[in-house]
Amino acid sequence: MITKKIIPNIFTLLNLFFGCISIILLQSKNFNYSAMFTLFSIIFDFLDGFFSRLIKNKNKFGKELDSLADMVSFGVVPSIIVFLLLENKTPIPFVEYLAFFISIFSAYRLAKFNITPHNNYIIGLTTPMNTLFFSSLSIIITNDTLFFINQKIIYFITMLFMIFFSCYFLVSQMKMLSFNFEDFSWKKNKIRYVFLLISIFLLLTLHIMALPCIIIYYIITSIYFHKKNS
């Protein structure tokens, strides 16, 4: 019984461990390997929640530990990524430090999550998804596969907009599309199935470039889904 209860906490600590490794790798601007370890953090964060629900393990300690781990893996990591992507590429001194607003808004979101009753839907953009967006974007940018990278002003403005929208959606009250299927019928889950099919198609055709596109598409789909059902 004791063993079952500590399994989710072990996964949480593995999430934190890989988040710390990701930060170390970012110090040498190794975005590719950092993204890989961030993916490990996301996987263990998912397993933490999955096993907690499976064994019905609800305790305050696990909840607090999970938020502290998430703050490192999905709060500090994306801020460092954006800081490094902006470093020495801004026309205004010290603007790159605005990247740490992502950490601030992530902390706010995680604290609010801990004191808010949980529903069957997601409110706002989750910190792991936000981190996945910036991790995949860092690989794309550092491989020079975006046309605006060499356009310094456009690049600078685009990055600032990304920081703003990241912070906004992290604390937004917007209901996001949930993948907790009540049943598997096409009629009730048409939007979910269409989203998954388009996402798979994008991954198969665009590979790593698909990830930021899928997350943006997820936000747009969520807006449409909840407007339709409101």
Image (cartoon, rainbow, N blue to C red):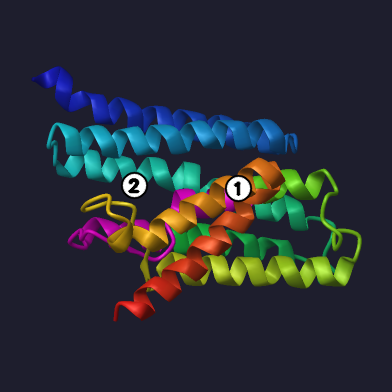
Q: Quadrant of residue 143?
A: top right
Whether residue 114 appears in magenta in the rendering, the answer is yes
Judging depth in this view, the residue of 186 and 32 nearest the camera is 186
Question: Viewed as shown, does residue 57 lie left or right of 222?
Answer: left
Question: Viewed as shown, does residue 91 lie left or right of 84?
Answer: right
Q: Position of residue 83 (x, y in %)?
A: 69, 54
The residue identified by callout 1 is 201
- The span from disc 2 to disc 1 (Cα, nearest Å) is 33 Å
- Main SS category, magenta section: helix
Residue at left offset 47%, top offset 51%: 196
Judging depth in this view, the residue of 181 and 79 nearest the camera is 181
Q: Which region is colored magenta? A: 107-135
**Quadrant including the C terminus:** bottom left
Label 2 environment density (alpha carbons within 10 Å; few <14, some 14–19, many ≥20): many
Front tag of 2 and 1 = 1
Sequence-first tag of 2 and 1: 2
Secondary structure under tag 2 reads: helix
Q: Residue furthest front?
A: 186
Q: Residue furthest left?
A: 1
Question: Viewed as shown, does residue 25 lie left or right of 116?
Answer: right
Label drawn at residue 67:
2
Three-letter code for the amino acid on which mark 1 is drawn: Phe
167 is higher (above) or lower (below) than 211:
below
Q: Position of residue 49 (x, y in %)?
A: 28, 39
Secondary structure under tag 1 reads: helix
107 is higher (above) or lower (below) than 67:
below
Whether residue 230 appears in magenta in the rendering, the answer is no
